[in-house]
Amino acid sequence: MTTKKFTELTRAELEVMQIIWAKRELFLSDIYEGFPEGDNRPAYTTISTFVRILTQKGFVGYKRCGKSHLYFPLVSKEDYTGKFMQGVMNNFFNNSPSQLLSFFCDSGKMSASQYDELRKIAEKILEK
C-alpha cells in the first residue's frame, strides 16, 4: 500500500477486514461465521460481495483450494490504522499530533487512568 494512494474502507468493509485480520486465513464461510448471529448479520452473498470488493481494492488476497478460496489480508491492520490515523490528523488537526491529543484530552470523555496512561507514554518518549 505504500506506492498506491490510501483507500479508506467503508464501515461494512472494515467489519469484514476485522474478521480477516483476526483469523489471518479463512474461507468465506469462516468470515460469515465471524459475524454475530441475529438480524444484523449480513447475508452470505453480501459478505461475498464485500470480500470481492476488498480483493479488487488490494486489501485481501486468496489461494484457490479446490472450488473454494482461502482468503488472507494483504494489508496489515497496523499499516491500515497508521495511514487512517495520519489522514485524520492531516484532515482535522493540521497534521499536528498535539492538536489531535488535545482534542481527546479536552473532550471530557477520558478517565483518570487514560490520562495517566498518556502521561506514561509521553514519559517513555522523552526518555529516548
Image (cartoon, helix red, strand yellow):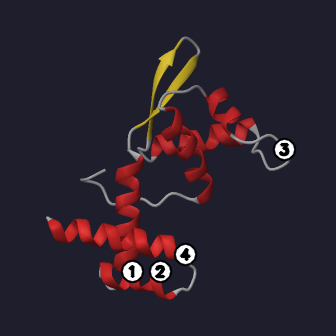
Upstream in sequence: badge 2 or badge 3: 3
- Residue 54 locus on image (x, y percent): 50, 44
Query: Above or below — where is 128 with respect to 46?
Result: below
Residue tagged 2: 104
Q: Distance between the residues labelled 4 and 2?
A: 11 Å
**2 lies left or right of 37:** left
Regarding residue 6, the answer to whether it shows in the image is no
Upstream in sequence: badge 4 or badge 3: 3
Front residue of this view, candidates 5 and 28: 28
Q: Distance between the residues labelled 4 and 3?
A: 33 Å
Q: Residue at x 41, y 83 (%)?
A: 92
Q: How far apart are marks 1 and 4 (CA)?
A: 17 Å
- Residue 23 locus on image (x, y percent): 52, 32
Q: In which quarter of the image is the C terminus?
A: bottom left
**117 lies left or right of 94:** right
Q: Which amino acid does label 1 sit on?
A: Leu
**37 lies left or right of 85:** right
Q: Which amino acid does label 4 sit on?
A: Ser
Secondary structure of the residue carrying numbered label 3:
loop
Secondary structure of the residue carrying numbered label 4:
loop
Q: Nearer the viewer, mark 4 or mark 2?
A: 4
Q: Which amino acid does label 2 sit on?
A: Phe
- Residue 97 locus on image (x, y percent): 31, 78
Cβ atoms under marks 2 and 1 closer than 8 Å: yes
Front residue of this view, candidates 111 and 4: 111
- Residue 122 locus on image (x, y percent): 28, 72
Q: Nearer the viewer, mark 4 or mark 3?
A: 4
Q: Residues within 10 Å of mark 4 (few under 14, many from 20)?
A: few
Residue tagged 3: 38
Q: How far apart are marks 1 and 3 (CA)?
A: 37 Å
Residue tagged 4: 111
